[in-house]
Amino acid sequence: MKLHQRLAQALVAHETTHLYGLVGDANLFMVNAYVEAGSGRYVACTHEANVVLAAIGFAQTTGRTGVATITHGPALTNVVTALTEAARGGIPLVVLCGDTAPGDLQHLQNIDQREVVASTGATFIEMRSAASAIEDLDRAFRIAAHRRCPVVFNMRVDLMWEELATISEPVPVPAYAMAPASGALLEEAAGMLASARRPLILAGRGACSPEARDALIALAARIEAPLATTLKAQGLFGGAPGDIGICGGLSHATATEVIMQSDCILAFGASLSKHTTEERAYTKGKRVVQILPDAEETPRLDTPSLRLIGDIAGTARAFAELLDMAEIPGSGATAGLAAKLTAEAAAFATVPAVAQTAPGTVDMGPALRRLHQALPRERVLVADLGRFVTTAWRNLPVTRPQDLVYTSHFGGIGCGLGQAIGAATAIADRPTVLVAGDGGFILSGLSELVTAVREEADMIVVICNDGSYGAEHVQFTNRRMDPALSMIARIDFAATCATLGFATVRVTDAASLDAACTAIAERRGPVLIDLRLDPEKIEM
């Protein structure tokens, strides 16, 4: 058996149901062998950056390791931003990347690939030889899953047709399990909780398993505490009593009041980033106990009063057991909360009043709320980065954490479309909604829309088209300067993207917004909504 065939078999053995790629001379035979095996779906993209971004979108929505493949040299340099996005976000990813034969110094695509990968924060695994290839690939999958990071598996092009004398079997990634936190630190944390009069339970993306959800809801009931989530864990506690929603800049008024009045926060699986704590305004003067499922460091980790490392669900149950042993009564912190939350829900169900905007444009917030009402309640949301993003997150909520694809770990625009394709090809029972700015959408590559059409993706794209790079427009106008340099020539996305196979609607007024809602309801394939906005009337 040839090496490229064995690598394809190993991908199947590692349960690679979706392989995202763009072929070149260093990976095309491996991809062909994977396709011929018929055990998985190969999704071909038009740009390497979107290959890796699609695998990131797959990983975020499925909770599994995303798998991508590219060729060497410029293919690798094309994915630097995407790899950095995955590294900053702790996304488990294996990228099978070709490499030039050693010694071929005049090869046009020759580059020190290890150094390129190192600059992104991703891990680099060398395929040492044909004989060790499967063992090396096993290691790549193991590191990606256990460290929650992107791994570039470097494959020399000159080895792809090597005949394997012996065939080694892939080793599945072993399950990674932790015991609950215990000992003196747990007891100290329980003491903080026992003395709290207004405790709050906060859950992040690291606490989003069904078992953790049940345990945290049970603990909240035991101590009579409200439940909140980070943005990435949105929807985790949906339907549970005392669910106040998101903690951070997206908090509604009642949630902000509850958070500010709390005196002890139990943060499970949350990094406590500045976005969650509102630059520590929400945690100042409070006792904060952070419970993490592993000891991996990230740039987003804040310093709590006390940190525990252990299984999330088990630690939540351990807290309840200690409080029961000490016969600590509930706090009563949720008294009167239900009525306020009902009022918040009723307010959200109403489309806000529409502000006056320039002719041919609509008010973004009310327009997105109207689209929210037209969309299926169960959907995946992928929001690219731009000044529209907080309004999109606020007005297009999801009902479970894995339906929120976060694209802003590295602060770059243009990472949304690729991740939306990954999500839409991975999830078949609900549509994927991409919200992007016109600048980010152009940067992401309009050609990638043909991938969504070819894959028959149930995708709804909403372009917040204000004709500008929004953050730069704000900076110019805040200093009373001419924002001309931040402006983009208005693109008719409805006309342009229709030629690529999308059903499109240009929204310029209330009637065309109604037409967009109808297009969502009657869609038979990908839909694009070109939302025309006034650059002078957009709130950050």
Image (tube, grey):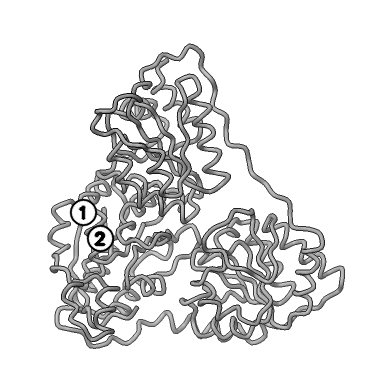
Instruction: Give left or right: position of 142 versus 535.
Output: right
What is the x, y in percent for residue 400? 50, 62
Is residue 153 positioned above or below 355 on the image? above
Instruction: Give left or right: position of 6 versus 315.
Output: left
Q: Residue at x 62, y 37 (%)?
A: 174
Q: Which residue carries the number 1 mark?
A: 446
Image quadrant where one finds the N terminus: top left
On the question of residue 427 being in view, the answer is no
**Quadrant of res 313:** bottom right
Q: Badges 2 and 1: C-beta atoms under 8 Å apart? A: yes
User: Residue pushed farthest top?
Assistant: 165
What is the x, y in percent for residue 18? 40, 40
Q: Which residue carries the number 2 mark?
A: 441
| CA distance for labels 2 and 1 | 7 Å
On the question of residue 205 being in view, the answer is yes
Is residue 155 positioned above or below 341 on the image? above
Where disc 2 sits, the SS reads helix
**Quadrant of res 483:** bottom left
Amino acid identity at mark 2: Phe
Amino acid identity at mark 1: Leu
Which is nearer the eye, 168 or 502? 168
